Image (cartoon, helix red, strand yellow):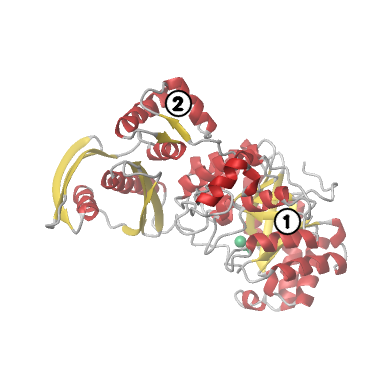
Amino acid sequence: MTSSTDKDRVFIFDTTLRDGEQSPGATMTHDEKLEIASLLDEMGVDIIEAGFPIASEGDFKAVSEIAANAQNAVICGLARANIGDIDRCWEAVKHAKQPRIHTFIGTSPLHRAIPNLTQDEMAERIHETVTHARNLCDNVQWSPMDATRTEWDYLARVVEIAIKAGASTINIPDTVGYTAPVESADLIRRLIAEVPGAQDVIFATHCHNDLGMATANSLAAVEGGARQIECTINGLGERAGNTALEEVVMALKVRGDIMPYYTDIDAKKIMNISRRVATVSGFPVQFNKAIVGKNAFAHESGIHQDGMLKNAETFEIMRPEDVGLSETSLVMGKHSGRAALRAKLKDLGFELGDNQLKDVFVRFKDLADRKKEVYDDDLVALMRAGEDPENDRLKITSLRVQCGTEGPQQADLVMQIDGVEKTTSQTGDGPVDATFNAVKALFPHTARLQLYQVHAVTEGTDAQATVSVRMEEDGRIVTGQSADTDTVVASAKAYVNALNRLIVRREKTAPGEDRREITYKDVS
Ligand code: KIV
Ligand code: ZN
């Protein structure tokens, strides 16, 4: 059980699987959620918000299984302020060694207007629902959504009600990313000083990054007395995202001189989980993102390189190894063996069984034949590209594309659909368009392409391209990814990967059911 005895300990509450997964297009499969939860648990996250059990059958199952599997972390589910939500949440989290119910209601004037409750009616609802949650579970967290735009008197009043009803954690969300550091610190400080009972509970901070201040606001809240930071890996989350776990953890580590607080996170696991979350969510990490961006530890300018060679501390406030980035990213070429590949992949966070290794080794050799030097990022992209091949109903057998200055371009595609080989030739406005038209001709569908993104994994003209394709059909949003030294091939594979995911999603859910009809913004 997490204890609140040490006054400088900051609990890390990760909501990648709830607030993060809520961002449009970041939907993860059941197995991906389980995998991320176990990585979070292993890295020392104190509380994992595993989902929103009432939102869908899928969320309920994921939260239940994560709860049953968790080794160390408290497992928390989200519930709106009503009995049905809270009961459903409890049904899911009760399997955990350490369950928590997190219930919330929007308390600002704008949010109070949605359920059309007066201040008194809402106060009564808070009392009832927190009491009900507390009767089910001895660990209850309560949040006044949009707290930072709630009138002070009313906020203080409802926080007191929730504490009296039995909430042991009070979370103060900056739901719309509106607050600033000085306010964030003051608000928590004042609540702790003025609300009866506030000294006996843990205050949490939950910031969104709309003005780019989520990390600063979270750290300021800690200065004000908060001892739980709510955050997500890579800052994943709706709109501009949530506070990034890696940023607050490393800020507290690096600047312990002025912020004498600590977390129990094993920072060396940061890079690995960051890569996995980027892969499964389909949200790539921006190159210059603090801590986990590709360029976060790269020193390209001559002056920097010179300084770095003389003394790494000239330009580095933390070492790449501190966050789990290996010192050199140049790994192997075509002469590297299977054992070396296994060891390198383990280093990168991929533990493979013998059969999996066999398959990856073939693809690694194929890549090494086409590319002189294979870097860490190439291997990560290779792993990303090769997921779920066995169950895929659509498989590309061959693709030939004719390009040139004279259009239109033509794609000749052979694809297996449920084991039956089909062939087509289609033209298009460019090679990718021709290829996508060919896929669509063989597998007609109404899904709309929402995003098509290409990144070069490494430098050089032989670099692999990673392609992300996001598609939407009847409210279901899926993301496909792939990598190849040939950008058009990577695009075709990513498109087919998205369609395979869509097929699975169609089988599991009725139209509209998958993308929650209930969102966390609904109150009643
Ligand atoms: O941003 C927010 O207010 C939330 C609440 C549900 C805690 O995510
Ligand atoms: Zn949020």
Q: Quadrant of residue 220?
A: bottom right
Residue 112 location (% of width, % of height) = 65, 75
For this view, does 496 lie left or right of residue 313? left
Dot 1 crowding, Cα within 10 Å, few <14, some 14–19, many 20+: many
Residue 411 location (% of width, % of height) = 17, 48
Q: Quadrant of the C terminus?
A: bottom right
- Residue type, mark 2 in image: Leu
Residue 459 location (% of width, % of height) = 39, 45
For this view, does 9 lie left or right of residue 523? right
Q: Which residue appears at 60% of the width and 69% of the height?
A: 176
Q: Is mark 1 within 8 Å of ligand 1?
A: no
- Residue type, mark 1 in image: Gln
Disc 1, SS: strand
For this view, does 7 lie left or right of residue 318? right
Q: Which residue appears at 67% of the width and 55% of the height?
A: 230
Name the residue that disc number 1 marks.
141
Q: Is residue 54 visible?
A: no
Q: Quadrant of residue 124?
A: bottom right
Q: Is mark 2 within 8 Å of ligand 2?
A: no
Q: Nearer the viewer, residue 18 or 338?
A: 338
Q: Quadrant of the N terminus?
A: top right
Name the residue that disc number 2 marks.
341
Eye-nearest disc, 2 or 1: 2
Q: Which residue appears at 40% of the width and 52% of the height?
A: 478
